[in-house]
Amino acid sequence: MTQGEKISVSNGSLNVPNHPIVPFIEGDGTGPDIWASACRVLDAAVDKAYKGEKKIVWKEVLAGQKAFDETGEWLPQETLDAINEYFIAIKGPLTTPIGGGIRSLNVALRQQLDLFTCVRPVRYFEGVPSPVKRPEDTDMVIFRENTEDIYAGIEFAEGSDEVKKMINFLQDEMGTKNIRFPETSGIGIKPVSKEGTERLVRAAINYALTEGRKSVTLVHKGNIMKFTEGAFKSWGYDLAEREFGDKVFTWNQYDEIKDNAGLEAANKAQSDAEAAGKIIVKDSIADIFLQQILTRPAEFDVVATMNLNGDYISDALAAQVGGIGIAPGANINYDTGHAIFEATHGTAPKYAGLDKVNPSSVILSGVLLLEHLGWSEAANMVLTSMEKTIASKVVTYDFARLMDGATEVKCSEFGTALIDNM
Ligand SMILES: NC(=O)C1=CN([C@@H]2O[C@H](COP(=O)(O)OP(=O)(O)OC[C@H]3O[C@@H](n4cnc5c(N)ncnc54)[C@H](OP(=O)(O)O)[C@@H]3O)[C@@H](O)[C@H]2O)C=CC1
Ligand SMILES: O=C(O)CCC(=O)C(=O)O
Ligand SMILES: [Mg+2]
């Protein structure tokens, strides 16, 4: 077996040896099926691209049911320590019970390692069945804030002593009058900070600049949640103007020009900015955004938003390009270099152990991992093979049920087809 070496970080850049050790979490439910398929595909691509010179040395770390069964803990400290030490990891989905029980281990990993950005690229692969007329117009990258918002888990259950205290405090000390049914309410708290917003928006604009993207849209519900989502919008615009200067043109600046010099001048300023290749930083209220990504997807590019909006938007956009079976993601701390790559979807428990579901979301998360390591030759090999395999209509059940003349294959067989087409 190849002896691996650790990835390290110096001056903000990764130093990647030829045999990097990368921890993986297999995941619950369909996790073992999709991870097995993905791992084979990623290994084959690296082997072919670098003719055996490079190889990822996978190191299993535990979380979820498997961790609980083997150690009595859902998320052992050893797992967090290993990801901290090795910097880069990949994971399958982990189960979260609804309405009670343990809090999300997926969210805990992001929060405890401070992986503040969840990057979810959404692109179309030719031939994938889609519910929209021009799925190729959807080409967006979601930057979802990963550590704040109602995902902070500050919740008090209806009927508990804590919720009574909280409601008394709100009514007696804060003058709150509009808790409609105070005797039977649960309460959740939504922290959104300037610091958290700024590091997320900074990452989104940096990405747009590096990748030659045209715009960054701040998505919020700031008309209703003024001091959290509304503040996100204001802090985002301020950061863009303060830190990125003439590399960006914001709708804040557009409004100022319109107020002072009129509509025509504002429109001209924006077209001049576009012509000069500046990133347009704009905003959209979350409800209308969900309509416009369906009706006018070509108008959106990089999307920066808070945790809950980002969760909803990720699944909605995934549907437009063929569904959650092909939706990858990466949780990244751009300051420390730590990252965990993972699919957007969950454990799909009804398909667990059937070798049935689409492994593409984890495979494409692996592609993001390879790109992150700077191993773009291997990443491109997987992408090209996926394009070829889908074009030949060899697909898993999720695509096969929507395609004419498809050959439906199992999760593992789809992995084999990808390897054969490399
Ligand atoms: N990051 C993570 O680890 C995440 C974990 N979860 C957790 O997963 C569990 C189940 O959540 P649920 O809301 O059912 O969402 P899931 O994403 O697990 O599954 C919902 C549906 O999406 C489709 N789907 C999911 N994965 C695939 C795949 N690989 N290939 C093809 N289709 C797929 C299936 O659709 P169909 O029925 O149409 O075939 C499935 O029934 C919960 O405990 C939840 O908390 C949820 C999201 C993310
Ligand atoms: O942690 C979970 O169970 C759900 C997480 C989720 O939906 C997501 O990350 O998109
Ligand atoms: Mg989700």
Image (cartoon, rainbow, N blue to C red):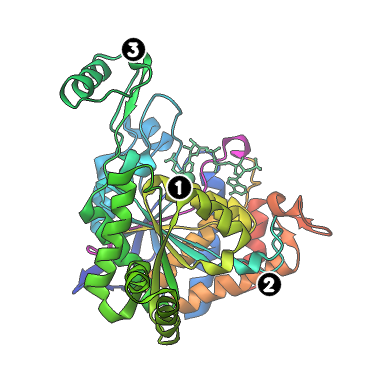
Q: Where residue 311 is drawn, which disc sits there?
A: 1
At label 1, which amino acid type do we have? Asp
Left or right: residue 132 compared with residue 249: right
**Which mark is nearer the camera, 3 or 1?**
3
Q: Secondary structure at mark 1?
A: helix
Q: Mark 1 or mark 2: which comes first in sequence?
A: 1
Left or right: residue 6 compared with residue 341: left
Q: Which residue is mark 2?
A: 388
Task: Give the residues in magenta.
Answer: 333-353
**Which mark is nearer the camera, 2 or 3?**
3
Image coordinates of residue 113 in percent, x first then y, are 26, 50
Furthest-bottom residue in view?
276
Image coordinates of residue 33 in percent, x first then y, are 57, 47
Q: Which residue is mark 3?
A: 183
- The residue at the point 78 percent across, 57 percent down is 403
Q: Mark 2 or mark 3: which comes first in sequence?
A: 3
Q: Mark 3 or mark 1: which comes first in sequence?
A: 3
Furthest-right residue in view?
405
Picture quarter with the C terminus = bottom right
Q: State yes or no: residue 352 in magenta.
A: yes
